Image: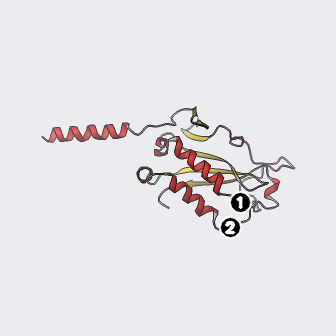
Amino acid sequence: MKTTLFSFLLFFCAVYTAAQTNYYAETKTFKENGYTYKCDVLPGNDVRLYNKENKLTYVDQIFKDTKEVPGFGFDFDDVVEETWTRPKSLSIVNNAFTADQKLRMKNRSVGICMYISPETGKVIEVLFRFGTRSPFATIPLSVYRKIEVELKQQIWFTPTKDGKRLNHLMRYWRHSFNE
């Protein structure tokens, strides 16, 4: 009896594990209804997932006038600081995932990069980063698409004079569901 019960539980666990499809294990293009996404798998099994229409994914942030790279932690503010964009961005991401998906993510995180127009302050592109073995690799593309669309529609910034000197602005964070 114990052997039968153990075999049943083992089979159930194997079926559940197999049901977790890894969509992003290799570099490929996803053509969906009305949009196309690219999945680039980099060395170290790092996934970059983005809309194929993105133009800034592999473009360095530079000053438009000098073409110099500003470097990490530049000593000026590129946007006017306010209090609503971070909580709203977190809410958009949190609401895109089901309760079951959030539970599966546990303490893991997904990197989210918003590319922002220095002229308008609007989010113009979104990039997602996670590992090929991460539970985020089991999330259907439609979830990432929903996040992209809502960030573009609902999030904006006010670029400063210095921010307007850059070819694009960026905001990046590691999102987890234990926040």
Task: Point out residue 155 in the picture as x, y percentages from the top left corner.
Answer: 65, 57
Q: Which mark is residue 98?
A: none
Q: Is residue 158 magenta?
A: no
Q: Are marks 2 and 1 in contact (CB under 8 Å)?
A: yes
Q: Quadrant of residue 27?
A: top right
Task: Point out residue 11 in the picture as x, y percentages from the top left corner.
Answer: 27, 37
Residue range of the region highlighted in magenta in the rendering: 54-63
Q: Quadrant of residue 16?
A: top left
Local packing at callout 1 (Cα closer than 10 Å; few below 14, some 14-19, many 20+) is some
Residue at the outermost left position: 1
Residue at x-position 56% and y-position 59%: 90
Element assignment for label 1 = loop
Task: Point out residue 105 in the picture as x, y percentages from the top left corner.
Answer: 45, 50
Residue at x-position 16% and y-position 38%: 3
Cα separation, mark 2 vs mark 1, equals 9 Å
Residue in front for this viewpoint, 40 or 150: 150
Which residue matches tag 2? 82
Horizontally, residue 132 falls left or right of residue 167, namely left
Element assignment for label 2 = loop
Residue at x-position 74% and y-position 56%: 121
Q: Amino acid at mark 2?
A: Glu
Residue at the outermost bottom position: 83
Which residue matches tag 1? 157
Q: Quadrant of residue 91?
A: bottom right
Figure check: 77 above or below 69 = below
